[in-house]
Image (cartoon, rainbow, N blue to C red):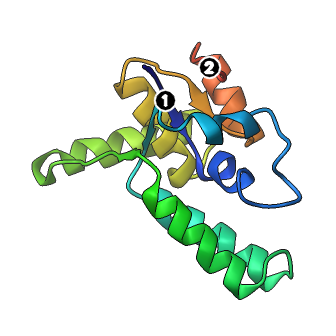
Amino acid sequence: MSSCVADASVVASWFLPDENNGEFAHLYKKTQEIEIHVPQTFYFEFCNAMLMAQTHGRLDLKTMSEILDLVWKLPIQIDYIEPLSMPSYYRAVVNSGLANHLTVYDASYLELSVRLGRIPLLTYDKPMLHAAKKLKIKTSL
């Protein structure tokens, strides 16, 4: 089974009608075959993307609700940080953000990829792609 870290932009693209033809569109049908890892902030980011899409008229409320129901059912592995490890985890994320000019949210995906053995990091975010390439992390499966 392949493993990857996928950010909210990739998962959102599977459901947004005007974005579902990107490089990672085919992965939605393979979610049972791919182990997808995400940091704890993923669902906040994903829900925010859906909220913004609905607010800007890209989705109606019913469709947004249906999408959220589908996402809860995806076999996504949420990274859990033990409370005693949190200070060093957050320090690593902040340091990654500083070193790579990323937000803490984006740096959490990069840090997760590195910590899991530099598994591929899937994103449409250009600064994250640049940081991954700089760290020799694959950005495709």
Residue located at (84% from left, 81% from top) = 56
Disc 1 designates what residue? Answer: 34
Check disc 1 and give the amino acid type: Ile
| Disc 1 element | strand
Q: Position of residue 117 (x, y in %)?
A: 38, 18
Label 2: few (<14), some (14–19) or many (≥20) C-alpha neighbours in 10 Å: few
Q: Is residue 51 visible?
A: no
Q: Position of residue 6 (x, y in %)?
A: 56, 40
Residue located farthest toward the left when viewing the structure as drawn: 84
In the image, 10 versus 101, the foreground residue is: 10
Question: Which image quadrant is residue 92 in?
Answer: top left
Q: Is residue 109 left or right of residue 48?
A: left
Residue located at (53% from left, 38% from top) = 31
Q: Is residue 40 left or right of residue 102?
A: left
Return the mark for residue 67: none
Residue located at (81% from left, 49% from top) = 20
In the rendered image, the vertical position of residue 11 relative to residue 17, given as above or below: above
Q: Given contact means CB atoms under 8 Å apart, are the residues at marks 2 and 1 in contact?
A: yes
Q: Nearer the viewer, mark 2 or mark 1?
A: 1
Q: Is residue 71 visible?
A: yes
| Disc 2 element | loop
Q: Position of residue 111 (x, y in %)?
A: 43, 34
Residue located at (52% from left, 53% from top) = 105
In the rendered image, the vertical position of residue 135 relative to residue 99, given as above or below: above
Q: Position of residue 63 (x, y in %)?
A: 71, 77
Disc 2 designates what residue? Answer: 141
